[in-house]
Image: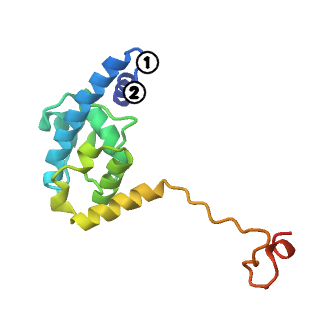
Amino acid sequence: MSLLEQWRETAYSKEMNKTQLQNFWSTYFAIEKEIYEKLLENPDEEVKGTVKELAARYGQEVFTMVGFLDGINESLKEPNPIETMEEDTVVSLAFDKEKLYKNMVDAKADWLYELPQWDKIFEPERKKVLYKEQKNSGTIRKEKKIGRNEPCPCGSGKKYKHCCGK
């Protein structure tokens, strides 16, 4: 079983009860926050190494680092081979700042996208724009329906029901 499969089997376990899962995730989220705080201090530095080395660098177990790599993978400039990675696989944490911020917003991870380190990366106005862009990307807007007795939008001057609405 790959490292990623082990992580996902535990993280989304059917064996644990609700309280155990909540404890697991609250512990993980605290660790994740710590790693992001360190990572965002130098956002332009490409952190690279084996899974085992990165786990040691951030003071974590390999298992927890795999979960972190799974979570950040969509925000990286070059995705890591997380499906097949082993402890000695070289991975990179070079992330796209805007994509990472938007993915944190999408995940409703306010403890991450509200980190003070973001203030050094983006102006408050830029953060608002990114936040709004992400929130609006999931919103489906329906166009106003044309009433049958309204003028046809094609510009013919006829009622919609006698023109394009047939």
Task: Kindly identify the residue that appears in the image at 19 percent across and 49 percent down.
Answer: 115
CB-based contact (under 8 Å), mark 1 and mark 2: no
Identify the image quadrant of the C terminus. bottom right
- Local SS, label 1: loop
Colour pattern = rainbow
| 151 on left or right of 98 | right
From the viewer's side, name the closer residue of 24 and 84.
24
Give the residue type at disc 1: Lys
| 50 on left or right of 16 | left
Residue 72, by quadrant, is: top left
Location of mark 1 (residue): 14
**Up-down relation of residue 148 to residue 22 (above or below):** below
From the viewer's side, name the closer residue of 65 and 153.
153
Residue 5 image label: 2
Task: Kindly identify the residue that appears in the image at 50 percent across and 55 percent down.
Answer: 139
Task: Kindly identify the residue that appears in the image at 38 percent across and 28 percent down.
Answer: 8
Give the residue type at disc 2: Glu
